[in-house]
Structure formats: structure tokens, C-alpha cells
Image (cartoon, coloured by chain):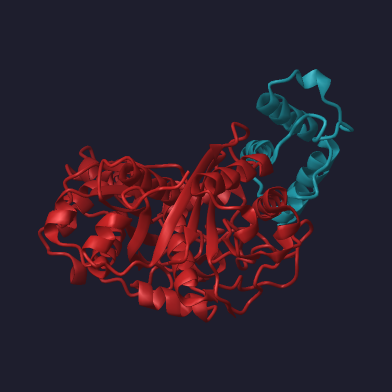
Chain colours: A red, B cyan
Amino acid sequence: MTRDETSRVVVTGLGSVSALGLDTDQFWAAVKTGQSGIAPLQGFSDETLKIRLGAQVKGFDAAAHFSSRDLPLLDRYSQFALVACREAIGQAGLEPAALFDAAAVIGTGCGGKETDEITYTHLYKQQKSRAHPFTIPRGMPSAAASQVSMQLSIAGPVFTVSSACSSANHAIAQAALLIRAGVVEVAIAGGTDAPFTYGLLKAWEALRVVSTDNCRPFSADRSGLVLGEGAGMVVLESERHARRRGASILARLAGSGMTADAGHITDPSADGAARAIRAALRDASIDAQVVDYVNAHGTGTLANDRTETEALHRVFGAHAKELMVSSTKAMHGHALGASGGLEFIATVLALRDGIIPPTINFTGPGEGCDLDYVPNVAREKKIRVAISNSFAFGGLNAVQVLQAV
Amino acid sequence: MVMDIETIVKTAIANQKMIDVESISLATSLQDLGVTSLDAITIVYEVEEICDIEVPNDELENLRTVQDIVTGVQSLLAKKAQV
């Protein structure tokens, strides 16, 4: 199916907060040079905590971004969402009128955990009898979406999408579908999460998938994921809208694919992942043979990296060996619901600049991991088509196909 | 209470897989019982709670049979008793 300008979706703005920096220039500078945002975990003194590493956002001063009137209602995950959205909208150069009618689809895997845990500590640990009245409006899973709407005067369709680690990619897909359906001309979408809270860290610890030494996607000695935090947001528009207002187009979002494994709650399935990639390519009307780069889900867990590689073999056949595949999670960590947003941004910039992000910490291929993972050093190469994968716990898969303009 | 590790482990597996505890022997392979990675960490969690031990992540990867879990728990309890 050939789409016309009204139903073609383009990317015109990027915004991020991550362990790699407080804006997208810092993020991309770090990704291009293979820097890691992973460091010893700060802010937790409990010796029973086995998680000792994190890709935490450093130097983020909430008071510099928000008024003292607004701040009490902003959980950390909402703060990240707002800062990233402001940057993306600023880059896109959108007028307030266009923004008023826009959609905002905000992915989050965790919601306002900081707020919940403060209240639970108050009640369970300190044995207080009253919860703070802001607990619900600050902590609810849709709080970030509401704050984005309120503070940026976005008054079209605004809602939260939650699908664990695929949240951002599902959110971006929903936003693109709203544009393609003619519901809106402009949408801001992506993901945000702030999972560094004691209870949540303990819960991740119990899953035994978090590495205690480092994140080494696709490597033989990989030992799990490292949690991250932040937000990755993008401005999407119909191509017609972007061209009419003379916006600078960064890339085209050619298609999205969404599938579910309908299988296991934590074990990934190559079939579900492969079907999502195929669905995305079909939606984009793009042949698998022209894909140059895959920004992998690449968590660094034993199960994901093997399964994802198998899925790529199934979809791309002999062309799989020609693909450049990298996981940027070794740099920005697994920022859960925000990861897909950060990875979408890395993929757009790879297309724009002809620089392929590396898989850092690569020590040699693991069993069943036999592709070109762009080990350790970024590669300069002009590319035309790239895909960005997100495969979440619960078997919820979302894949984007991006095209250079 | 004399801790019967074998019973604790078998009961944890039986509860997780919703099967009859009598159907589990020490030689039974975890794969044959359909124990997934999530099942494995849940079974180990139950046993850790009862026995007040901590099973390191890397030991989990080597568990193939019910006997492997029992032996691992016994060894951790013996180490704990020495402390």
C-alpha cells in the first residue's frame, strides 16, 4: 500500500533524559563514542540489596526545571517525561496552536513508583495513619501523561500506554496510528520510567536477571541486564503537516508491528518477536533485504539475546549476516518503559548521521549469537532503513521501521 | 524441628507446578517437570524463606534435578552452621 503525505508519518523532534545526559545532544555524543552510563548505584545504603549497579540520571536538578508550585505534584518519572517532551517540542518548533490539537501518548512500565513507595513507607514502616493527598494524582500510571498535557497545553487525545519494556514503542505506534487515521496531525510519544526505588529494586533482584558486574549484550559471558531510568520522547507529524510548516524532517516512521507471544510471562519467544518484525516491515511495505541496521532489544540476559538473534535469522534469512545489530542498553541501561524511546532516538540519529551505535562491553559472541553486533566501536556507514525492537515481559512485542529522508 | 530438606524442596516444587508431591523423586529432572526459569526462581525463593538461606544466582544455572536443589540447600545450610 502506498501512502500519501497525509498518512505518512515523519519524526521532527527528539527529547531525552538518560544516564548518558540531560538532553539529546549529550545522549548522542555518548552513544557515538561508546560511553557507558552504568555506574555503582547511588542513594541506597541497604547492605542486603544485591543490585549494585544502575544507569541512573546524574546531575538532574528538578528545581531548575519546575516551579515550586508544580514540583510537589511531579513524581520523578513525570519530571523526566516533561523535560524530554519540552526538548522534543522545542526541536520540532511547533506553534502552540498545533500543540493544542496534538496527541500525547506516554509509555511507562512502572508509573509513579517513587510516590507509591514514599506513601507505603509512611504507612507500613512509620505506622502513620494517613496517606499524603497527592499520592494518587502524583503516582498514578497516567500522571506523566496528564502533566505533559497540562504543562505543555496539549489538549487532543492524551493517554498512557503500559506494556512493560515495550511501553515506549507501543506508545509511538499508537501515536503514528492516530496520525495515519487522520485523528491528529501531530503527536508527541515515547516512554518514561524512574525505577530506582527500594521496593522495585528488591522486586527486580528477586527475578535474578539483573547483572552484578555489567551489561554485555550478546556476549558469551553476559550476566543480565542493568536497570536504567529516564525518558525518550519524539514528535511525530503527518508529512504534509511537517512540509507545510517547513519543519526539518529527521526520519520517516515507515511502519510499526505489534504482536504478542501468547506464551510465557517471562520467557521470550522467537516466534512472537519474528512476527512483530515481519508485521512492521509489512506495515511499512519495506522488503527485509533493504534493512541495514537493527537497534536490538538486547537486554544482556541469557534468554533475550539468544531468542532475539534467532528471530532475526527467521525474518531476514541469509540477509541476517549483512545486518548491523546493536544494543544501546549497555550504555543507557534498561530504562524499562523509556528504553524504546531512547532506542528510537538512537535509531533516528543513526539514520540522520550515518553513524551506527556500538554494542559496548562486547567480549565475544555468546552461544546462538552469531550476527554483526557492531562490537564496542561505532561505525560510520550511510544507511537507509533501520528497525528498533522492543520485546517485553509478558510477551508484548513492538517494532518500528524507520527510513532516512 | 528437624528440617527435612527433601520434603521442603519437593513440596515447593509440587506447590509451584501444582502436582502431587508423591510424583516427585530425587532423580526427577526439572525439565521433565516443565520447570521454567520463573518456576525455578520461585521454588528457590520458597526454600530460601523456609531455610533462611540465600542461593546465589550462578548456582541456579546448574540445577538439573530435584537432587541438585536438595544438595545445594544442604551445602548452604552446612556453611551457615559453620558461621
Residue A251 coordinates in the image, percent (x, y): 41, 64
Rendered view: A205 above or below A386:
above
The residue depicted at 39 percent of the width and 77 percent of the height is: A26
The residue depicted at 67 percent of the width and 55 percent of the height is: A305
- Does residue A113 appear anywhere in the picture? yes
The residue depicted at 72 percent of the width and 30 percent of the height is: B13
Residue A234 coordinates in the image, percent (x, y): 34, 59
Query: Quick one: A196 or B71, which is closer to the camera?
Result: A196
Res B3 → quadrant: top right
Res A91 → quadrant: bottom left
Query: Quick one: A191 or A323, which is closer to the camera?
Result: A323
Rendered view: A116 above or below A58:
above
Q: Is residue A252 left or right of residue B75?
A: left
Res B5 → quadrant: top right
Query: Quick one: A274 or A229, which is closer to the camera?
Result: A274
Q: From this viewpoint, which residue is outermost toward the right?
A: B27
